[in-house]
Image (spheres, helix red, strand yellow):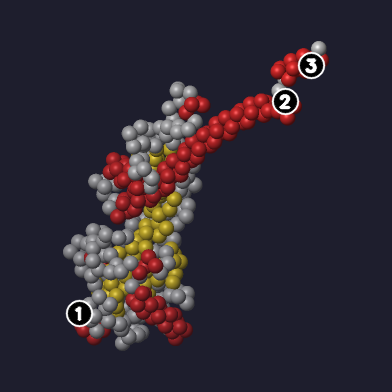
Amino acid sequence: MRRLIRRVRRAVLPPRGEHGGVGALVALFLSTAVLFGMGAVVIDVGLLYSEREQLQSGADFASWKAAQSCVFDPSTANCNNATQSDNARAYAVKNAKDDHADARACLNNQNCGTWNTTVTCPAPPAITGTYDSVEVRTSTRTTTGGTLVPPVFAKPLLGPAYQGKKVGACARVAWGTPASATVLALGVSLCDWERITGRNSVFRGLPLLDPLLQQTGVYSLLGLQPPLDNAITISNPPLSPCNNSWDQISPGGYAWLGTPNAACQLTIAPTITPEYWIDSLTLTLTTLSTAVNCTNALASARAKGTPVLVPIYDKVQSFLTNLFPARYRVIGFASFVVTGYTGLLGGLGGLVGSASSLTGLVPGIAKLLCGLQLCIYGYFTKSVVPEHLPKAFGSGRNFGVTVIGRTG
């Protein structure tokens, strides 16, 4: 009887060494399923984050390029929502790993239409002055033309109703004239600026890309016309009136302004109301060191071939010559490339000169071409000055210098 009981027990119960084996296997299978499910969700969430990162990079890049395009050509034929949306889309695509993305641009928050995503930019900072802005929103576009990032591994967990998620990003850039700037203390007349630029239609590019490498903070735009020398004679009001066909009343020439620092620089903030006037640099025995500093600064600008910011003036209050105190009304900033000179300071250093870096003219010949006057040679270029989160722009006319910065 005992043998029979033992046989039945052995047939019904598993061996003692395998107690709990089935439970362990069940737990293993359950935990593996959970791990696979969690892994699938993590992978798909990672794909969404990757998509958003690409779209954000595309929005940042596209908004900056749209702003630069409007700075280069502010005409309504170029700087409009449709054209810049195409521009933004092209740059958003370049930042997508699969070469597919959608983008829409809106200038100055006007006539934006229906956005392709509900994602919005952060609120812009409080900004003063007159400026333009562009907002770019990018969104998902798949290789098949879809607008959703489909689930890859987690689809069985999420069910057939879930087809994917639309991802978006937003970026905003603003640009305008500088509210203030540190400039070379070399004032140039509006008359000569209009003559050399063809009344804001001709700007020259740099012969080399060196300024991009020299960290000057002022960057000339690419794609401008080749550099060409122009001469600006010294200002001797009222003996040097403007000789432009459209203006023969305004003052012409150049003048050294204010009380510059050791680098021959001034920090000025021109305003329309009230008008911004600055005295000329008075040449006396006590300002000889300033004359030397400005001589060195101009020689350095010529040697480097990089753009320097200069103030533009349109009115003068003075005596017979600029050897006596005068006042100049500054209305903005321009980006000037110095190529040579026949004299530096009116009545001082007139025998000091440097041949043009473009034409190679010796100072003597250059002086004859200037009509036996002191001259500075060079040309105007269009430049941008990047600024992080700009909060102030100027309210005057743009003479080719534009502050540009991200605002969202």
Q: Which of these two is toward me, 233 or 127?
A: 127
- Mark 3 is on which residue type? Arg
Is residue 95 visible from the viewing direction of this image? Answer: yes
Which residue has dot 2 on it? 15
Which residue has dot 3 on it? 3
- The relative height of residue 287 versus residue 155 in the rendered view (above or below) is below
Which residue has dot 1 on it? 369
Label 1, residues with CA under 10 Å away: few <14, some 14-19, many ≥20: few
N-terminal label among 2 and 1: 2
- Which residue is painted at 47% across and 39% down in the image? 47
Q: Which of these two is toward me, 202 or 208?
A: 208
Can you give x and y, in whole percent of width and height, for residue 16 in the image? 75, 27
- Which residue is painted at 39% across and 37% down in the image? 140
N-terminal label among 3 and 2: 3
Can you give x and y, in whole percent of width and height, for residue 369 in the image? 20, 79
Cα gap from disc 2 to disc 1, whole angstroms = 114 Å
- Mark 2 is on which residue type? Pro
Quadrant occupied by the N terminus: top right
- The relative height of residue 73 versus residue 49 in the rendered view (above or below) is below
- The relative height of residue 406 versus residue 358 in the rendered view (above or below) is above
Cα gap from disc 3 to disc 1, whole angstroms = 131 Å
- Label 3: element kind: helix
Q: Residue furthest left?
A: 245
